[in-house]
Amino acid sequence: MTSFQQARIDLGGQLRQLREAVHLSGKELAERLRWQPSKVSRLENARQTPTEDDVVAWAQAVSATPDTTDELIRQVIALAERHDSWKQRYRSGLAAIQEDMRDLEARTKLFRAFEPGIVVGLLQTAEYARHVFRKVKRLYSAADQIDAAVRVRMQRQEILYDRSRTFRFVVPESALHTTLAPADVMRGQLDRLLAVSTLPNVEFGVIPFGTELPSAPINGFWIYNDAMVGVATMTKDLVLRDPDDIAFYVNAFDAYAKVAEFDEGGREVLIRILHAYRKQDPH
């Protein structure tokens, strides 16, 4: 067991003890917090990482002391700032990571993502996601939760239809030629991107081949509101909260977006790539 997962288990145990000390069932606490009962279970059983807001609300609901609340916040911050290896995180479970992402996205009104080599998870089809998770499982020796991970990833996508939120995605054309699944699955994925690109609160930009890039696309990154940036490397999952770091990535995103094709221009690129995959059809 990794240190990250052990810390999450310890925190979940403390939350459970606080709930039980005031003789509340998980369902009763969920009702008091206006949460789904499953969220209480996920937090207590270390299947999801709590946020600062989560533990503050929990502490208030069980009348915890200020010192106890401060200690819970300290532990959550330590978890959030931990630069754990992806191998360690994936061993804690593919589905658990998807639950963490869904909770983070639920608190985000403006989501910006740049991905140089893969379709963003929020836009993946189930079959594309399944092939991606199989590769992740093999590379990181992840727990075998592929079906559950795909299910949660699909559930995460419901947020795209919430018009109170804005989503901006930018990818180089090369990312959409990166064949992470069979040609028929890639065609289905391109169809999905065409459909999502027409949603009124979604901007999907493609940087066509031959376009001069403002900088080398080394890593993907995701900007949540103006509060946090996630940066993924092969071995580290970085969470950046420093205002200077956030400003840097916002500027980087804007530079990529400036040279990307959106709306009909972006869809023309998607259709061209879709035709290329259709040519691979042996029939």
Image: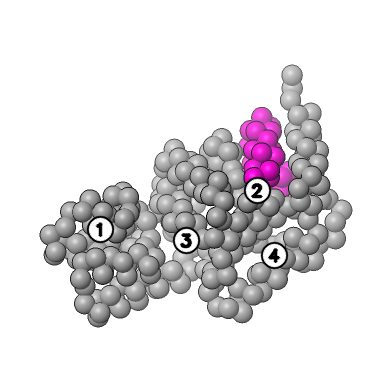
Main secondary structure of the magenta stretch: helix
Identify residue type, mark 2.
Pro
Residue 174 visible (yes or no):
no
In the rendering, at what x and y percent does residue 68 appear? 24, 76
Judging by the rendered image, the residue that carries numbered circle 1 is: 32
Marker disc for residue 124: none
In the rendering, at what x and y percent does residue 46 appear? 32, 57
Marker disc for residue 253: 4
Mark 1–mark 4 distance (CA, rounded to whole Å) = 40 Å
Question: Which mark is first along the chain, 3 or 1?
Answer: 1
Residue 185 shown in magenta: yes
Mark 1–mark 2 distance (CA, rounded to whole Å) = 35 Å
Mark 3–mark 4 distance (CA, rounded to whole Å) = 20 Å
Label 4, residues with CA under 10 Å away: few <14, some 14-19, many ≥20: many
Circle 2 sits in a helix, a strand or a loop, which is it? loop
Marker disc for residue 200: 2
Query: Which residue is at a point 75% across and 35% down the rendered structure image?
Result: 274
Query: What is the magenta range?
Result: 173-200
Question: Which mark is first along the chain, 4 or 3?
Answer: 3
Query: Which residue is at a point 66% across and 54% down the rendered structure image?
Result: 169
The quadrant in which the N terminus is found is: bottom left
- Quarter-of-image position of residue 218: bottom right
Question: Which mark is first along the chain, 2 or 1?
Answer: 1
In the rendering, at what x and y percent does residue 277 appear? 75, 33
Identify residue type, mark 1.
Arg
Circle 1 sits in a helix, a strand or a loop, which is it? helix
Label 2, residues with CA under 10 Å away: few <14, some 14-19, many ≥20: few
Residue 52 shown in magenta: no
